[in-house]
Amino acid sequence: MASLHGRGDVRFFDRVASLYDRLMPSADADALRAGLAFARRDVTRVLDVAGGTGRASRALAREGLSVDPVVVDFSRGMLARARADGHPVVRADAGSLPVRDGGVDAVVVVDALHHLPDPERGLREAARVVGPGGVVVVQEFGPRTLRGRGLVLAERAVGFDSTFWTPTDLCALLSAAGLEPRIVSEGFEYVVVGRVPAEG
């Protein structure tokens, strides 16, 4: 079974889990909120997929949104940190989420899609579990920005086999997953959103 991250990535994240939140910037709460606002249904049930220690969940909580996302990840170390921080967690593969079709209102994937061994499958699975009018919100790194080029080199040096996309390219992947895409923000850390078409 393909893991949420590549096998080497999971081991890496298990090792750095205790330091991860000190090393990574906060998730862009305003952009995530704008992505969730693209939904055409009430957003109360949210999955923070490949959510690690719960950075996106914390950002949404700071915004005062009445949601308590479930953090889904494959790294036991990262989930232990998320659980210790009070987040509900599920250990699962992003390519095979233990959620029924249309079972949630939104999925957020923050700074993690590039680690998935099959990002297209991960997006299709996210689209599957989101109900009509709900959204898949993705925050990623722009590989053509100066900082983005440095990040690409750094991840290769660590041994990650990461894939990065421009916002336009990622919107094309969201469209291929059956979602209606939109760019929410651009730059080094950008956000795109895909909405599940409404029924009828």
Image (cartoon, grey):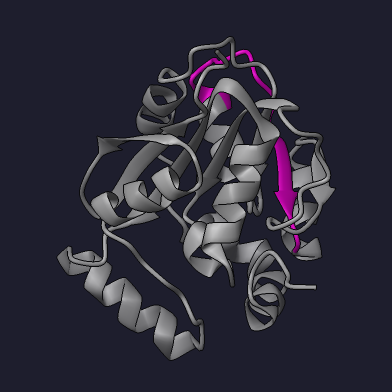
Q: Residue at x 52, y 24 (%)?
A: 62
* Observer-nearest of 134 and 30: 134
* Observer-nearest of 151 and 103: 103
Q: Residue at x 66, y 16 (%)?
A: 44
Res. 26 in view: no
Question: In the rendered view, would you say 126 is above or below 93?
Answer: above
| In-image side of 114 versus 144 (left or right) | right
The residue segment tinted magenta is: 61-74
| In-image side of 61 versus 91 (left or right) | left
Q: Residue at x 51, y 82 (%)?
A: 160
Question: In the rendered view, would you say 61 is above or below 59?
Answer: above
Please provide percent x and percent y for residue 149: 23, 73
**Count of residue discs:** 0
Question: In the rendered view, would you say 109 is above or below 41?
Answer: below
- Quarter of the picture holding the N terminus: bottom right
* Observer-nearest of 66 and 171: 171
| In-image side of 98 versus 114 (left or right) | right
Q: Residue at x 65, y 19 (%)?
A: 67
Please provide percent x and percent y for residue 156: 41, 86
Q: Quadrant of residue 41?
A: top right
Question: In the rendered view, would you say 136 is above or below 160?
Answer: above
Please provide percent x and percent y for residue 167: 27, 50
- Quarter of the picture holding the C terminus: top right
Res. 96 in view: yes
| In-image side of 114 versus 91 (left or right) | left
Q: Residue 83 magenta-drawn?
A: no
